Image (cartoon, rainbow, N blue to C red):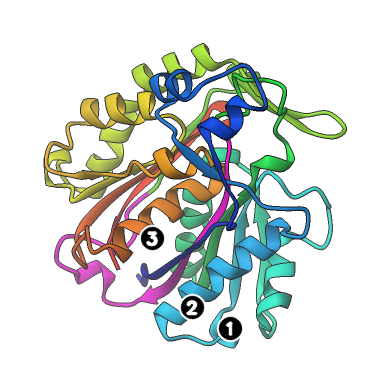
């Protein structure tokens, strides 16, 4: 069976940077309060003339350039986002138009913070089924548009950005040393706790039950992440990197430790970028690769979690 592989990555963030001191001038908070509770120092915030599809298109264009492909080479575009205000055209359709693509299949996937790992699995399955050969998978969110800037417990968390991956068919995947380019997905949810993370109302606003999410993430997710490694046939100690959803440094560090990835580089992009929802995993991974912190072909655990109290993870080979 044909497998699939991530062959290139790209990321993009708006130029405007909002520091903790900037936020302290807006709400009752401080750099010490934010850093001690969530580990975030800065976040990028887009303006009204920077819609979600523009962020996504910039990241997608960089990934295509890194792959040495033209937009016309792509036959599937998936955009994971929860901040698309319009129902139609979809963000994927708008990205395809911005990049001048031919006639790709276009779909948005809304699983909030675990959207990218869900979308990556959909791309992998689609390619394995023979319905596509080259996919552009993007996680993009503009959280500033849905932030309640009067709520110091949530507005300090959020940032804007996009990350993208080019996924191609890989006929040699079953025989590739160390396993396929994209390993089996493990995904699921806790429907009865779905209200713990919400984007609701008109205009929509982000809200969460922070303590419930923290307890769920730090206690329930590590064994699930270890099962992701088991499905991929790799021991946690053999992982070269772990890229979790960049929600909160106080979640990322204990979860990574409990997984047992003792030799892995742990992505901590949340410190500089905040919580960018579906953008966080591809953006953090793209930066690690750009800095040369992961060797090509090395195994990397991607694990998204959050809204809907959903999760999805897979082990991939670094492009």
Label of residue 71 in the image: 1
Mark pair 3, 2: CA separation: 13 Å
Q: Mark 3 points at which residue?
A: 286
The residue positioned 79% from the left and 34% from the top of the image is 204
* Mark 3 or mark 2, earlier in chain: 2
- The image quadrant where one finds the C terminus is bottom left
Residue that label 2 marks: 64
Q: Distance between the residues labelled 2 and 1?
A: 7 Å
Against 68, is 28 above or below?
Answer: above
Q: What element carries label 3?
A: helix
Q: Residues within 10 Å of mark 2 (few under 14, many from 20)?
A: many
Q: Give the range drawn in magenta.
A: 157-184
Residue 32 in the magenta stretch? The answer is: no
The tag earlier along the polypeptide, 2 or 1, is: 2
Callout 1: SS: helix
The Cα–Cα distance between marks 3 and 1, rounded to whole angstroms, is: 19 Å
Q: Residue at point 83% right, 52% down?
A: 87
Numbered tag placed on residue 182 in the rendering:
none
Residue found at x 22% / y 58%: 293
């Amino acid at each position: 069976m044909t497998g699939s592989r991530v062959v290139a990555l790209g990321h993009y963030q708006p130029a405007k940077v909002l520091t903790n001191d900037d936020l302290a001038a807006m709400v009752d908070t401080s750099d010490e309060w934010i850093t001690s509770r969530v580990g975030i120092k800065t976040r990028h915030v887009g303006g009204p003339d920077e819609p979600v599809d523009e962020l996504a298109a910039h990241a997608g264009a960089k990934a295509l350039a890194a792959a040495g492909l033209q937009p016309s080479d792509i036959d599937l575009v998936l955009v994971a986002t929860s901040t698309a205000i319009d129902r139609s055209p979809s963000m994927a359709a708008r990205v395809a138009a911005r990049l001048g693509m031919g006639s790709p299949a276009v779909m948005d996937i809304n699983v909030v913070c675990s959207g990218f790992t869900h979308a990556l699995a959909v791309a992998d399955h689609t390619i394995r089924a023979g319905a596509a050969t080259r996919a552009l998978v993007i996680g993009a969110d503009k959280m500033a548009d849905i932030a309640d800037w009067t709520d110091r417990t949530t507005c300090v968390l959020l940032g804007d950005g996009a990350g993208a991956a080019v996924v191609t068919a890989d006929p040699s995947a079953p025989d590739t040393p160390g396993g396929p380019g994209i390993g089996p997905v493990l995904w699921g949810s806790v429907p009865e706790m779905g209200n713990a993370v919400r984007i609701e109302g008109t205009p929509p606003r982000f809200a969460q039950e922070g303590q419930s999410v923290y307890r769920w993430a730090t206690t329930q997710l590590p064994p699930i992440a270890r099962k992701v490694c088991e499905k991929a046939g790799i021991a946690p100690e053999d992982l070269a990197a772990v890229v979790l959803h960049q929600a909160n440094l106080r979640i990322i560090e204990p979860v990574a430790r409990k997984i047992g990835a003792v030799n892995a580089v742990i992505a901590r992009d949340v410190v500089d970028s905040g919580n960018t929802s579906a953008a966080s995993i591809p953006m953090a991974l793209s930066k690690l690769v750009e800095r040369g912190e992961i060797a090509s072909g090395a195994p990397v655990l991607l694990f998204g979690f959050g809204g809907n109290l959903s999760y999805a993870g897979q082990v991939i080979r670094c492009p």
